[in-house]
């Protein structure tokens, strides 16, 4: 299942986020391939969170799971 694959990739990213006091939570994977995540801890409200989301989380998810279209923070 796609959601399980996304969770596995997020679990690879999680230690890096936790090292800086943050975390990521999978909210939903839509039928059209959009992954919705919630940044928590230090990541929530951080000015660099969009950079983390696009250059870190989204880049790795799209590389590992080509069927995905993008990542959004909710």
Image (cartoon, rainbow, N blue to C red):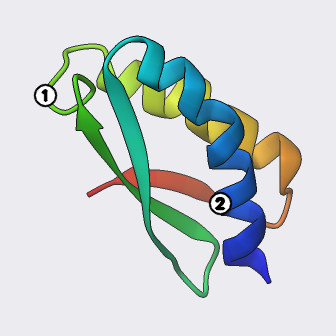
Image quadrant in which the C terminus is located: bottom left
Mark yes or no: residue 68 visible.
no
Residue 46: x and y, percent?
19, 19
Disc 2 designates what residue? 7
Q: Residue at x 73, y 48 (%)?
A: 9
Q: Residue at x 75, y 47 (%)?
A: 62
Which badge, 2 or 1, is on the more N-terminal residue? 2
Dot 2 lies on which element? helix
- Which residue in the rendered view is the most extreme toward the left? 45
Disc 1 designates what residue? 45
Residue 68: x and y, percent?
72, 63
Horizontal side of residue 38 vs 7, given as left or right: left
Dot 1 lies on which element? loop
Residue 34 placement: quadrant: bottom right
Residue 44 placement: quadrant: top left
Residue 66: x and y, percent?
86, 57
Horizontal side of residue 69 vs 43, given as left or right: right
Q: Residue at x 46, y 13 (%)?
A: 19
């Amino acid at each position: 299942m796609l959601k399980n694959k996304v969770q596995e990739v997020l679990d690879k990213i999680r230690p890096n986020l936790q090292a800086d006091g943050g975390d990521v939570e999978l909210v939903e994977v839509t039928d059209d391939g959009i992954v919705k995540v919630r940044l928590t801890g230090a990541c929530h409200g951080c000015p660099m969170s969009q950079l983390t989301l696009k250059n870190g989380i989204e880049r790795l998810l799209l590389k590992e799971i080509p069927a995905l279209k993008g990542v959004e923070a909710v």
